[in-house]
Amino acid sequence: MSSDESTSRVRRGNLWDTPAPREGEDVDRVVQHRGVTIEQIVSGVVDVPLDFDQHFDEWVTVVEGAAVLRVGGEDTSMAPGRWLFLPRNTPHRLVSVDPGTRWLAVMIE
């Protein structure tokens, strides 16, 4: 492989370039490679709980801000550095989130 081919796969970005939306959540796919997807999620005002039940395994962490996730009837406070691993088909709910909260999520097919 030539050096041009190897560097053409290198991608760069800055997580802080994505502003928080006024309402809801914005999702930015950072990388998708070999069955793994990494997304940045930036939360705005979320007035009602959001329910999720995904067909993939997910590891999620808060980079900035705070939120509460409910999994199996148990609330987990999420703050910077806290993370959860959610096996596929695990129902979970975003109960509350501070506007401006930044998440990193890794989805594994």
Image (tube, rainbow, N blue to C red):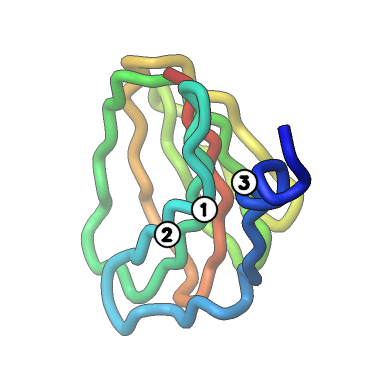
Task: Indicate left or right for 31 with 44 as reference.
Answer: right
Q: Which percent across, then down, holds residue 51?
A: 25, 40
Where does the C terminus fall, quadrant-wise? top left
Residue 56 vertical position relative to residue 96 in the rendered view, above or below:
above
Density class for disc 3 (Cα within 10 Å; few <14, some 14-19, many ≥20) is: few
Q: Earlier in the sequence, mark 1 or mark 3?
A: 3
What's the residue at 38%, 58% (across, down)?
A: 27
Reading the image, the residue beneath label 2 is 28
- The answer to whether mark 2 and mark 3 are in CB contact below 8 A is no
Secondary structure of residue under mark 2 = strand
Mark 2 or 3: the one toward you: 3
Task: Report the front residue among 60 and 36.
Answer: 36
| Amino acid carrying mark 2 in the image | Asp
**In percent of the image, x 50 and y 76: which residue is there?**
18
The type of residue carrying mark 1 is: Val
Image location (x, y in percent) of residue 1: 72, 32
- Residue 30 numbered mark, or none: 1
**In the foreground, 8 or 105:** 8
**Image quadrant in which you'd find residue 13:** bottom right
Name the residue rendered at 31%, 84% in the picture. 22
Question: Decide: marks 2, 1 in contact (CB < 8 A)?
Answer: yes
Q: Which residue is mark 3?
A: 9
Q: How many neighbours does mark 2 have within 10 angstroms: few (below 14), some (14-19), or many (20 or more)?
A: some
Q: CA distance from mark 2 to mark 1?
A: 6 Å
